[in-house]
Image (cartoon, rainbow, N blue to C red):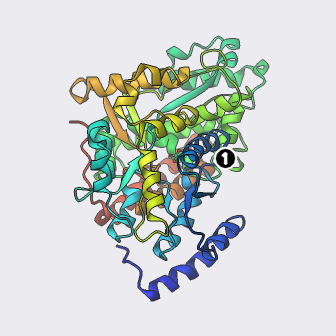
């Protein structure tokens, strides 16, 4: 567990910042360590730098600025999808007592090191004064609660288990997306696309895994597709047998998926992979629905230019990726920080942000407001309908919400980095190799993941109940 900052700890973490932070990040960190104590400022850290991400964030910042014109708003962004780089920048800052007024964090385990080390103030009063308990679904509220106290405010709900496709490419190849409900049907379509010399595709599937998590995310949705009982056992740290049949089935599907991806996947970011689908150089990619923001920025029309379907085996599931902000203890501008959180959790804040982001609003009053819903594009209206169906039908009817482990919510951070490393090694060795080499790589991956779960067993401090 992290301990709150003594002077010695602070020195160590400041030194760590200097060591860890390289390249472009140096500018941000240097700024932060030498920042003038500007009176009345709001400093916000995020990793939102892609076209769709920045557009959505800017809407929210503008709204804040309009409401509090005397405050100097200082947004700082550390590029790198899913906070892959950001997390290694923000943590030393927070631990050094240099936290910004608020920073982006995922609900669930990602918050835990800050909560357990007392780096975040509990915001029960804000939750109560804003009436959030009555408009935030309990499943989401519980992800930002630790020991009964609230520590963060959810801004969005992203869906993880989505496959995106270029509609004209599928039409030109006579592929009907609605038939791709199993991985074998999906791979048959990929095979057909790769054999069709006239398709002009770089590859059937676009992957950009330069930050590693993008590939692990594909595996995550294949694991969810093995069924919620298996997924629940996995995130609760109970899959410790490398020969577990569901785990092997998922990693085997993953190996096949990789065979159809672009050769330059390791040098592309998630949004560059999205661009391959947007431009028709690839037919498909699996990605969370922040992808929709990229299609929107490119002026693509849902249903005409592109479409989506749930990753095979997960049609009755909604993989949750929830972005939040919190109130770090001892921030320089506590009032501005709390006003920011108030905006983040408000209907107006959610409506400023979510339509451009690709996500849906967590607040049920917004989700049930027809005027608000009309402001969302067609993809998000379909996502809202799916989310409502899944939450209304519930677990007794076989409909599930599940937290993403790749995005830091479902499992302790001590397993996530090793998972990404093992998956990255797997991608490098499994892709386009012969089947014997692939099977060996699959076994290595299964062993790496299960043994890491065993090694980190003491870090599983939460028991998820997804199946009801
Ligand atoms: C997720 C985050 C999303 C989106 C995505 C890609 O982890 O929750 O808001 O930003 O990463 O950067």
Q: Quadrant of the C terminus?
A: top left
The image position of residue 77, as x and y in percent, is 62, 56
Q: Identify the residue at image location x=41%, y=63%.
A: 414
Q: Identify the residue at image location x=39%, y=32%.
A: 318
**Outermost residue, front direction?**
70
Snapshot quadrant of residue 44: bottom right
In this image, 158 relative to 53: left or right? left
Q: Which residue is mark 1?
A: 269
Of 265 and 327, the residue lying toward us: 327
Instruction: Tell me: residue 50, above or below residue 22.
Output: above
In this image, 361 relative to 454: left or right? right
Q: Is residue 353 visible?
A: yes
Q: Identify the residue at image location x=28%, y=55%.
A: 124
Snapshot quadrant of residue 295: top right
Q: Quadrant of the N terminus?
A: bottom left
Snapshot quadrant of residue 416: bottom left
Of 267 and 159, the residue lying toward us: 159
Crowding at label 1, few (<14), some or many (≥20) Cα neighbours within 10 Å? many
The image position of residue 249, as x and y in percent, is 42, 38
Q: Is residue 288 visible?
A: no
Instruction: Tell me: residue 450, above or below residue 2.
Output: above
Label 1: which secondary element: loop
């Amino acid at each position: 567990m992290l301990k709150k900052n003594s002077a010695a700890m602070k020195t160590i973490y400041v030194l760590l910042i200097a060591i860890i932070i390289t390249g472009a990040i140096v500018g941000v960190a240097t700024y932060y360590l030498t920042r003038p104590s500007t009176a009345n400022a709001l400093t916000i850290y995020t990793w939102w730098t892609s076209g769709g991400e920045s557009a959505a964030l800017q809407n929210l910042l503008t709204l804040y600025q309009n409401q509090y014109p005397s405050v100097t708003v200082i947004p700082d962004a550390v590029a790198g999808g899913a906070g892959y780089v950001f997390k290694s920048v923000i943590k030393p800052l927070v631990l050094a007592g240099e936290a910004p007024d608020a920073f982006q964090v995922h609900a669930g385990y990602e918050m835990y090191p800050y909560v357990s080390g007392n780096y975040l103030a509990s915001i029960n009063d804000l939750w109560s004064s804003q009436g959030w308990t009555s408009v935030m679904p309990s499943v989401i509220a519980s992800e930002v609660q630790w020991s009964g106290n609230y520590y963060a405010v959810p801004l969005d709900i992203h869906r993880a288990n989505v496959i995106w496709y270029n509609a004209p490419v599928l039409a030109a190849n006579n592929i009907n997306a609605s038939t791709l409900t199993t991985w074998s049907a999906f791979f048959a379509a990929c095979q057909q696309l790769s054999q069709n010399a006239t398709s002009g595709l770089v590859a059937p599937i676009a992957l950009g895994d330069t930050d590693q998590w993008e590939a692990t995310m594909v595996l995550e949705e294949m694991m969810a597709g093995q069924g919620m009982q298996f997924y629940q056992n996995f995130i609760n740290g109970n899959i410790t047998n490398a020969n577990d049949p569901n785990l092997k089935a998922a990693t085997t599907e993953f190996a096949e998926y990789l065979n159809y991806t672009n050769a330059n996947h390791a040098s592309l970011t998630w949004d560059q992979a999205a661009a391959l689908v947007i431009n028709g150089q690839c037919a498909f990619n699996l990605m969370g629905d922040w992808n929709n923001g990229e299609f929107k920025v490119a002026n693509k029309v849902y249903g005409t230019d592109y479409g989506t379907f749930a990753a095979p085996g997960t049609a009755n599931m909604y993989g949750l990726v929830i972005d939040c902000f919190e109130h770090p203890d001892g921030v320089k501008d506590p009032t501005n920080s709390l006003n920011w959180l108030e905006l983040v959790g408000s209907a107006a804040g959610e409506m400023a942000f979510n339509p451009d982001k690709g996500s849906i609003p967590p607040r049920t009053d917004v989700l049930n407001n027809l005027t608000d819903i009309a402001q969302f594009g067609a993809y998000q209206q379909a996502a809202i309908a799916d989310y409502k169906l899944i939450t209304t039908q519930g677990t007794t009817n076989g409909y599930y919400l599940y937290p993403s482990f790749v995005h830091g919510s479902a499992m302790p951070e001590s397993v996530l980095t090793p998972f990404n490393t093992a998956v990255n090694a797997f991608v490098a060795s499994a892709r386009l190799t012969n089947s014997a080499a692939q099977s060996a790589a699959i076994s290595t991956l299964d062993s790496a993941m299960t043994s890491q779960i065993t090694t980190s067993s003491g870090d599983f401090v939460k028991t998820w109940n997804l199946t009801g």
